[in-house]
Image (cartoon, grey):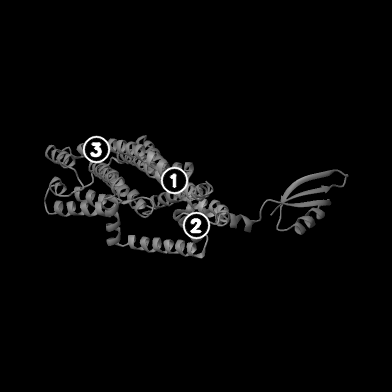
Amino acid sequence: MEFLYKVKDMSGQVRESTARADSAQLLRARLSSRGYEVLEIKEQGFSLMQFQIFAQADALLARFEPISLKDMVVFSRQFAAMISAGVPLLRTLTIIVEQCKNRKLKGVLDEVRKSVESGVSLSDALARQSGVFDKLYISMVRAGEAGGFLSEVLKRLADFLEARQKLNTKVRSAMVYPSVVLAIAILVFWAMLTFILPIFEGLFRNIGSELPAYTRFLMSLSEYMRSIWMVIFVVCVLISLFFLRRYYRTEVGREHIDGLFLALPLFGDLSKKVAIARFCRTFGTLIKAGVPMLSALDVVKDTAGNASIARSVERIYNEVRQGGSISKPMSRLPLFPTMVTQMVAVGEETGNLDDMLTKVAEFYDMEVDNSVEALTSLLEPIMVVGIGGIVGSVVVGMYLPIFTVIEQLR
């Protein structure tokens, strides 16, 4: 441990300094043996055990720190720039580990560096960290290692991840607004029934006359929300969500729920456009990186993010494995519009399939932009009217008895 001590030497001068010792008593004995008169000893800093506890807690927190898509984009950009500049692989990984700000990613990259240092290839080292690097990333790096163009592959990966991040941001912006407004509307409705309506309840009972049916309904609903039945209802909802999540983890459940999500009135069309853009960009990026066709389809199937889309890609994969083309099974699937299948067919005939897929992805990125803007502009007035209707319905229920009393007085 580290201590701050104050001593008086033989000449009478007072000195202050710091020293390390196992305990204050040992430090006092050591200073006294040197002829000092010990005036004060204060503990400073942490003991070795405390440092170890804090280090373990920090490591535990680092394990739960999320690795965002932005972190992966920055890592891929740095990796590609340094490899293309001719910096050796091990030196590149060492520099990136030192500069990485995300603690979890830093630990993962340090493990990758140790694996490469022990003689493992970069793709195999990344495969050992499958929780961070998906099949797409590993497959492209393996293709770049085999073809000798690793820096180009890393640049394409960075471009791909950046485009994917932009797409996710657009979709998230479309989902966040209605979710927040809906949550606020429910909170306002609950607060008015739980706190405001009971204030008027005593007044309504002293009126003496029969209350309107709508007011009686609101008062019954307010009593229900303040009773034990509301707790039971919330518990039942949480249990239902738990079992729904368990069902979603099964293959049948995930395909069923994802299919229902694609069929939603407003968000279903947006989800399909996002799925087509992701499929075309992922598939085109893999083909351009030199990944074999079947391997690329297998990777796209696993990174689709939707079970219904993955099943469609699996049908394409089975037909291509038997010697068929890509465009024919795509034309028989309802997920892919005619324009997409025609562009893919032209790409197969001309040998520029990767370029065609990239163009389709860019087109559907624009479609997603337009759909998000249209959805936002449509939801804004609906949400405003909805919140106004919720608040107004409670206010009307509170003032109806007052109108009734006024009519009776007249």
Contact, mark 3 vs mark 1 (Cβ under 8 Å): no
- Taking depth in this image into account, of 241 and 340 the one nearest to the observer is 241
Disc nearer the start of the sequence (1/2):
1
Mark 3 and mark 2 in contact? Answer it, CB < 8 Å: no
Q: Amino acid at mark 2?
A: Glu
Could you tell me how far apart the alpha carbons at marks 3 and 2 are, in whole angstroms?
Answer: 70 Å
Between 125 and 169, the one lying in front of the other is: 169
**Residue hosting label 1:** 180
Vertical relation: 97 (above or below) 205:
above
Label 1 neighbour load within 10 Å: few <14, some 14-19, many 20+: few
Q: Tag 3's secondary structure?
A: helix
Marks 3 and 1, the one that precedes in the sequence: 1
Provide the residue designation for mark 2: 210
In the rendered image, the quadrant that contains the N terminus is bottom right
Q: Nearer the viewer, residue 399 or 317?
A: 399
Task: Kindly identify which numbered label has been placed on residue 227.
Answer: none
Q: Which numbered circle lies on residue 358? A: 3
> What whole-number distance in Å separates the C-alpha atoms at marks 3 and 1?
34 Å
Residue at (11%, 51%) from the top-left corner?
Answer: 323
Query: Which is nearer the eye, 371 or 213?
Result: 213
| Residue 253 sits in quarter | bottom left
Say what amino acid the circle numbered 3 marks. Answer: Thr
Which marked residue is nearer to the observer: mark 1 or mark 2? 2
Structural distance between the alpha carbons of marks 1 and 2? 39 Å
* Residue 404 in picture, x, y percent from top left: 50, 49
